[in-house]
Amino acid sequence: MPPEPLLQILHEDPAFVIVNKTSGMLSVPGRGDHKFDSVAYRVRQMYPDCIEQPAVHRLDMDTSGLLVVARTTEAHRELSRQFTARETQKRYVALLEGILDGDSGTLELPFRLDLDNRPLQIYDEVHGKMGTTHWEKIAIEGLFTRISFVPITGRTHQLRLHSAHEKGLGIPIVGDPFYGNGNGPGEMKLHACELGFTHPVTGQAMRFKSKPDW
């Protein structure tokens, strides 16, 4: 039986909805009949007039936080354009598995898909595409560091790789099952906490915030 179509909806609009995704949930259906459950699937269940492919952008399954999901074709087209043109504003908060030196900076690393170990990404100065992230330390919390990330590019696993790689911060995100010491979905401490864009119909500036529960 399909799961109950429940999501935490932070904002409802005729053109889109803002979802606060939990860690461990897919943004869109995965490959295979057992991976149909996702934010996109549940939004379609909750809003019968929703378009068939409502996802505008994605968060990794292990990442929690803010997603905008389109309800109409027109909204999907305009919101997708804004993301492609980098006209949106995004900020993430993460908990790193160690003490980070320094207060702020910018990370630029070339990386690509590891063809032998999908979906992992690997550092590659020759064939990799550059990913750029601004970071700022928020606080030291015991043996961990709370940090703010503002990604300029939107590469797969960008923040996770920028955190863990020795040429990046050199400290993995707590609970990361791919680049750190996580054991499974739902453990990683990476949260999309701010999302800004222009309303696809009215042109109004929209800004949403969400605090993680950790």
Image: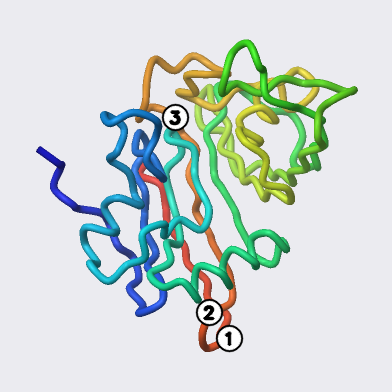
Gap between marks 2 and 3, in whole Å? 31 Å
In the image, residue 97 above or below residue 6: above
Q: In the image, what residue type sits under mark 3?
A: Met
Query: The N terminus lies in which quarter of the figure?
Result: top left
Is the C-beta separation of discs 1 and 2 under 8 Å?
yes
Residue situated in front as seen by the camera: 89 or 189: 89
Give the structural element (helix, strand or loop) at label 1: loop
Which of marks 3 and 2 precedes in the sequence? 3
Foreground disc of the pair 2, 3:
2
Give the structural element (helix, strand or loop) at label 2: loop
Q: In the image, what residue type sits under mark 1?
A: Gly
Q: In the image, what residue type sits under mark 2?
A: His
Give the side of residue 201 with respect to residue 213, left or right: right
Q: Residue furthest right?
A: 126
Gap between marks 1 and 3, in whole Å? 35 Å
Residue 18 image offset from top left, x and y in percent: 39, 64
Residue 12 image offset from top left, x and y in percent: 33, 73
- Indicate the quadrant where residue 157 lies: top right
In the image, residue 102 above or below residue 59: above
Give the side of residue 144 with respect to residue 49, left or right: right
Tell me which residue sits at (74%, 43%) in the image.
133
Residue 199's tag is 2
- Indicate the quadrant where residue 159 lies: top right
Is the C-beta separation of discs 2 and 3 under 8 Å?
no
Tell me which residue sits at (81%, 28%) in the image.
128
Residue located beneath label 3 in the image = 188
In the image, residue 21 above or below residue 203: above
Query: The C terminus lies in which quarter of the figure?
Result: top left
Q: Residue furthest top?
A: 116
Residue situated in front as seen by the camera: 11 or 103: 11
